[in-house]
Image: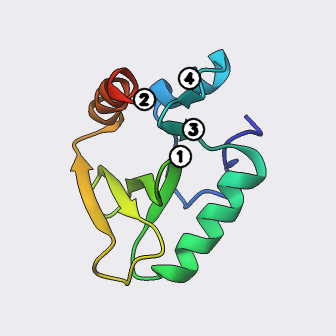
Amino acid sequence: MTELLDSTERPEGFTYPRGLVRLVELGLLDLDPWWIMRGAEIRLRFAGMRQRYPQRKRVPFARRQDNDDVACFDLDRGTVAIVHDFASSGWEGRAEFADFRAWLHQAVDDLLAFE
């Protein structure tokens, strides 16, 4: 799956949830206002977030088109974190979901409400 981070790029032991892999396989990537990142975009964001927030272990996978919010797998907490990227460290947290499925439900709600 070259569109997402491959096993040599991901943190050790991390695998993508099947639900995200399935969305990418089906090409369901634009859930306005959320966009599933892939290719060079996900690699650039992953590297940038590691520099901006070196104390955090997060793997980004989606971004909002209308602000700097990024959905990430938070490896320390085992959740999905919404991070306001480029905010000062310690102030970047916006929301948290128990897992990818919970985030996806919210993303679909956002899609239905977004204009």
Residue extending farthest top: 26
Which residue does the numbered mark 4 point to in the structure image?
23
The image's mark for residue 36 is 3
Marks 4 and 1, the one that precedes in the sequence? 4
Q: CA distance from mark 3 to mark 2?
A: 18 Å
Q: Residue at x 56, y 38 (%)?
A: 35
Q: CA distance from mark 4 to mark 2?
A: 22 Å
Residue 68 to residue 103: above or below: below
Whether label 4 touches label 3, CB < 8 Å: yes
Whether label 4 touches label 2, CB < 8 Å: no
Q: Amino acid at mark 1?
A: Gln
Q: CA distance from mark 4 to mark 3?
A: 9 Å
Residue 49 to residue 97: above or below: below
Q: CA distance from mark 2 to mark 1?
A: 12 Å
Residue 115 to residue 88: above or below: above
Marks 4 and 3, the one that precedes in the sequence? 4
Q: Residue at x 66, y 20 (%)?
A: 27
